[in-house]
Amino acid sequence: MQRGPEIKGWCPGAFAPMPSGDGLLIRAKAVGSRLTATQAREIARIAEDCGNGLIDLSQRAQLQLRGISESTIAEALRRLEAIGMLAPNVDVERVTNVIASPLAGLAPGAFDANAMAAELAIALRRDATLRALPPKFLFLLDDGGALSLAEVDADIRIEAATNGELAIRIADVPDRAAFVAADEALDAALRLARAFVELREHHANQFRRIRTLVEALGAQVLARAAGLELRAFGDTHTAARGAQIFGAQRCGSIAFAGVGAPFGRWRAEELAAVADFAQGAGTGELRLTPWRALLIVTPDVEAAQKIVAQAQDHDLITSANDMRLAVVACPGAPECPQALAETRAHVMDLAPLAQKFVGADGVGLHLSGCAKGCARQNASPITLLACAEGFDLIENGGADSAPHLKSLTFEAVLRELSARASGRPQ
Ligand code: SF4
């Protein structure tokens, strides 16, 4: 371990913990989607010994431990390092942001996304130029297998294409990509990242993500700077929420149990139990997903069914129809200092109503503690935004959209949603 933690207020890492209403938040760094039962069990123990026993599975498929204190953080980092879930230093940690296909290497795909994620992590460690990438910059590796990452936002994507080639996509350019041989894909993606760093520096570092550079300069400028040519490539945004991931699933020759916790927030004992399931009826392996669920890999679907029954005893989410999935809510008060109200405390009241409004991705209602809208960037059928005097109600928009109704009490929100759900005007 090269240096101690720096306390920062954004983009949590292990070396850059984020202060929160319940203590420090640190991230256990996974490169790729694989997590062993041993790692999961130790993370649960670290959360209990060094934090407040709560672990978030983020939309970037990373585990974050909550309630860490100044006096326990050194031990937490030492133990994360022991299970291979700590970057070598703060600079490498900041730029090693990679999300890979959840079933990489298990189910058929165009390439092994986890193996490529490991290579990418080594390249990010060695290449000093890439240390200048902004901290939220995300690489995404989609092998084109059963669980598509098409809906997941990223700066640079390597995706399955045709004719044995891979496609290199740039964020917010849905209709074009550069095509390269599979063994050249990583190098091409890294050239693109370096070109972004150089163009960004040339423009006084005003671009925080690739999409802002593309808006200002155009994708072709970036691609040419990386020696790539963009050609037509259709929008692959077809899969809804990782297709079917909850419950007992068979996927070609493999099977898994898809298990979630509400809002991706796991109690340490739940994560430890899932690790035990993976060790018992499973193969000892879990997969991290950006859908805030864990996949427990099993030798057959019968074993997956057994795990699902065990998970139900822990009140975990094992079905896409679970009403808790219809509501997306940020942590809100008191955890987030910017929040204007509690959010998750209201969810069980809202969930039955939210189910009446669900859209194609299974979400009916987004409850946000402030206009930042951290929990969901996409539009939702209903968004409730905490404001100084209650909640604003937004239809078919995001947290930053104009409200349809303003400053409702929570009781008025429930009345309004009930009326809408039954088709009665208010
Ligand atoms: S949306 Fe606002 S209140 Fe909610 S977590 Fe983000 S910053 Fe905090």
Image: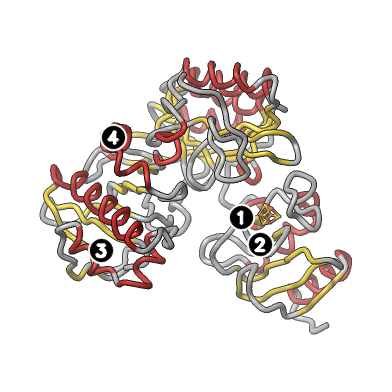
Ligand 1 located in image quadrant: bottom right
Q: Residues within 10 Å of mark 1 (few under 14, many from 20)?
A: some
> Relative to 116, is 272 on the left or the right?
right
Q: Is mark 1 within 8 Å of ligand 1?
A: yes
Q: Secondary structure at mark 2?
A: strand
Q: Quadrant of residue 318?
A: top right
Instruction: Name the mark on residue 366.
Output: 2
Give the residue number, with chain letter if any, for mark 4: 105
Looking at the image, do the residues carrying marks 1 and 2 touch, with CB atoms under 8 Å apart? yes
Q: Amino acid at mark 1?
A: Ala
Q: Secondary structure at mark 1?
A: loop
Q: Nearer the viewer, residue 117 or 2?
A: 2
Estimate the x, y position of residue 357 in percent, counting from the top left: 65, 68
If you read the primary sequence from the N terminus, does the residue marked by circle 3 or circle 1 appear first?
3
Give the residue number, with chain letter if any, for mark 3: 222
Q: Residues within 10 Å of mark 2 (few under 14, many from 20)?
A: many
State how many labels appear: 4
Q: Amino acid at mark 2?
A: His
Estimate the x, y position of residue 244 in percent, counting from the top left: 46, 50
If you read the primary sequence from the N terminus, does the residue marked by circle 2 or circle 4 appear first?
4
Most distant residue in the bottom direction: 425
